[in-house]
Structures are given as structure tokens and as C-alpha cells.
Image (cartoon, helix red, strand yellow):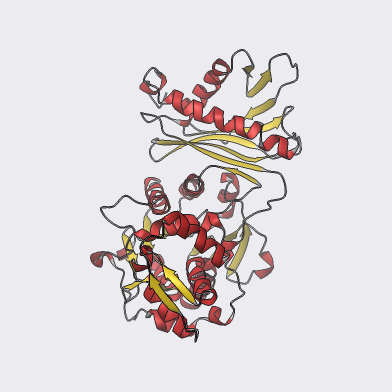
Amino acid sequence: MGCVAVVGASGFVGKALIEDLVKSTPHKIIALSRSDRTKFNTDRIEWRQCDLYSLLEIEKALLGADTAVYLVHSMLPSAQLVQGSFADYDLLLSDNFARAAKKLKLSHVVYLGGIIPENVKLSSHLQSRLEVEENLRTSGIKTTALRAGVIIGPGGSSFKMMENLVRRLPVMLCPKWTATLGCPVDLRDVTQSICYCIDEEKVQGKTLDLAGPEKLSYKEMMQILSRSLGLKRMFFPISYFSPGLSKLWVSLITGAPRDLVFPLVSSLRYSMIPREEHVLTLPNHQSRRFEDSLKEMKTIDAPKERPHAYFYSGSLSNHEVQSVQRITPRNPMSAKRVAQSYFKWLPKFFFPIVSVKSKDDITTFSFFGIKAPLLILKFSEERSSPDRRLYYITGGLLSKKDGKGRLEFRATLNEAVTLAAIHRFRPSLPWYVYKYTQAIIHLFTMNAFKRFLNSPKNKVTHQNASA
């Protein structure tokens, strides 16, 4: 009997997976959640609160696990001010998880991603799913990647958007993307597949597709759904609805956050058809048809229920800042080299306005004519390595002293990408002053630094990246 960690345990798939793990396996379960859910602990389930943006917290949360299931997708803000794309956040979170899993010597990871269409330019949403999968594999841990399209079950964000459209629109104009084909898969088929992969060695380490038994367009799914709800709906196909207008329309009608709707709708121009030779087939198991899934779903009788994914994670009223900026040097570079380059480049770029001084493990940023430093950073030798450089923001005129801010540079995807991230930074400036001054200057500075690293005149990227 082993111990399985479920990362993203309070989400749509996570909650259903825990139920199946308890019913069909003997494993103990570590359930990771951002919120405190320890009151739900049982003899076999131990809930652990964990901030996935903190590598240290993930390492502690995974202690005792042999296998982990990674279900995290970051598409909604985690702080009051967020800078960076959801793809960069997804990559950072998966990298945190992969580093912790490798350090703790987990034997196996199961990742649930999305169906990846072949021979097309992927949307940012699908590209992010594939990138996370690749990042987990490059960690060296045996990774089983399961890919699924629309998952049908109570609390699913994609299905809830479809349901809300059908409930709220007696007449629906159907843009071209509603003719896109997919193989909707029942939530229980997904969780049973994950349970199977946890224990079945012959499928471990493979990339497998999960699919229901039918190929249906989104229009056909909505027609079947309307009949299941006992609603008469009229559907008229049109060809001139732009993707941008579709995103706004879906968000407005369904009540789903734009940060969630826009990436999903952008992916709907592709048929989500699984590769037949890679479809996972469970022994003695019959996958559920779309209509059968609907008949068994409790969510049909609870139209006011909002999916977990519709809610922003974390507190958005604490005036904290989260920023992740992707740096892609022309040649692979270690995080150490990128960080060194940044601290050398910054005072030259802002000369003579800003100066940067380092002594021992303390780095200070100062403004011309002001004696007190703007920011004080303390380098963490213990938590750093050549592929990760961590600095705690300990003071300065621009930072609140009671904050837990930190700056890090980390190289990932075999040093092809470096993420420059600020976590839990609390500015001392009034919030709206900060938002329209310091925050904008930070983005301007990072974009200028990216151009510097990729400039043909820059010799840094030609040097040994591991130096």
C-alpha cells in the first residue's frame, strides 16, 4: 500500500478522484489545497494546506508520498495584481512541483492535460498544457500524461459554460466553432483511468488519450443537453461571429470569468479528436455516452451552483503582487547567469538614476539623491542553485516590512526558458499609485532586459550558460 498525493485536490477532478481512490484502491491519500481543509481529514485522507507558488511549502506538503497526481491549471488571478500570462504561471507551478517531486524521489507522476491536435498551430491554452507535460518529463521523474477534451461532470467549468448557454438562450446563434468535433468523456471515466494508471506499470510513462465513445460537435452536445433539461431550444449556424466576439458573448451569457473563457474558446477552433492508437482502454470497462452522463449528473438539478474554477484563488484584497515574466535567451542560460546579468545590466540601463550595490548576500537598489534604499534583497544561498536564484525582499522605501515578498530567477525546460518571478510583494506606495507607476516600470524594465539578452550585440548569451 502506497501513498498518493493529489495536487489540486479541491478542484473539479480532484474531489472526484479522491472518492475513487478511496473506493477502488488501498492507498493513503495526501490532498493538497490552497485553503485549510484539515477538518475533512479521515483515516485515509490527510488534507495539507499548500501555496503552490512556494517551492518550500510544496516540498513539505509532498513528504511521505510515493506517487502524485498533478491536476493544477492556473487560469485565474492569485493576487490582487497579476502580471504575466496564465501559461507562464502554469509553467512556474509545474516547475515547482517537478522540483519538489524530484527532490523527494517520487517514483511516478500522473498528469491530466488536454487533447493536443496534430499538425496545427496550437492555441496558447493547448500549448500551455503541452508545455507543462514536457516540463514534468524533463524533471526525470516517470510521468504518465493523460489527455482529455471536454470532461462531463458536476462542477466542470467547460460543461457549466455549455449548460448556462442552453439554460439562458432560447434561441442560439452558433458560430463556426460550435461545429468543432470532440469526444466528451465522463468525469468518472477520467478518475477511474487515473486510478488505473497509478497502479498499472504497463501504462506508466506513456502519453495516453481519454475519450468517450462518441464524436460530437459542441452544437450536438448542446442539443442533447437541451433535451436532457426538458428545454426547447433553437440553434442557427452562422459563419461571421469572430472569435473575439464569441469570447465576450460566452463570458457575458455564462457568467464565467473572462480569464477562464478566453483561453478555452480560443482552443475550440480545433477538433479534439483523440489518437486512436493512444486511447486508454480500461479492462472490463465501458465508457459512458454523453447522454448517459447527463442523466446521472446532479449538477443538472442545481443550476445556481458555480464551479470551483469560476472562483479566484487566494485573497484578492490584500494588496499583494504576483508577477511572472518569461525570458527566452537566444542560447540556453542558467538562472545564475541570468540573475547576474540582470543586476549588472539594471544600473547601466537606468544610469545615473538607479544604482545597484551588492555586499555579501545583500543587494540594495537606490535612487539618485535619496540615501535610503528603494529595495533591499537578501540572497538565499540555502534555497538557491545554478538553475534557481532566490532573493527575499526584506525592506526598502518601496516595500512594506510586514510582507513576504521574494524575487526569483529559475531556468526550466533544459534552460531554454528562465522565469523571473515576484511573489507576495506588498508595496508601500498607495495601491493605485503603485499600480500605475512602480508596476508599469517593472514591466517596462523586464521587457527591456529581455531585449538586451536577445540583442546580437550582447555577448552574455554567447558565454557558457552553466558558468
The x, y position of residue 211, in whole percent, is 34, 70
Q: In this view, does 297 lie to the left or right of 47?
A: left
Please tell me whether residue 195 is drawn above or below residue 459 in the rendered image. below
Residue 10 seen in the figure: no
Numbered label tally: 0
Q: Nearer the viewer, residue 145 or 130?
A: 130
Please tell me whether residue 154 is drawn above or below residue 118 in the rendered image. below
Residue 372 seen in the figure: yes
Quadrant hosting residue 264: bottom left
Q: Residue at x 46, y 29 (%)?
A: 450
The x, y position of residue 91, in whole percent, is 47, 46
Q: Nearer the viewer, residue 170 or 210?
A: 170
Q: In this view, does 164 lie to the left or right of 112?
A: right
Please tell me whether residue 165 is drawn above or below residue 64 in the rendered image. below
The x, y position of residue 352, in whole percent, is 62, 12
Question: In the rendered image, which quarter contains the C terminus?
Answer: top left
The x, y position of residue 34, in whole percent, is 62, 57
Q: Which residue lies furthest to the left in this view?
A: 277
Quadrant hosting residue 457: top left
Quadrant hosting residue 277: bottom left
Q: Residue at x 68, y 19 (%)?
A: 366
Q: Residue furthest bottom?
A: 230
Please tell me whether residue 189 is drawn above or below residue 448 in the rendered image. below
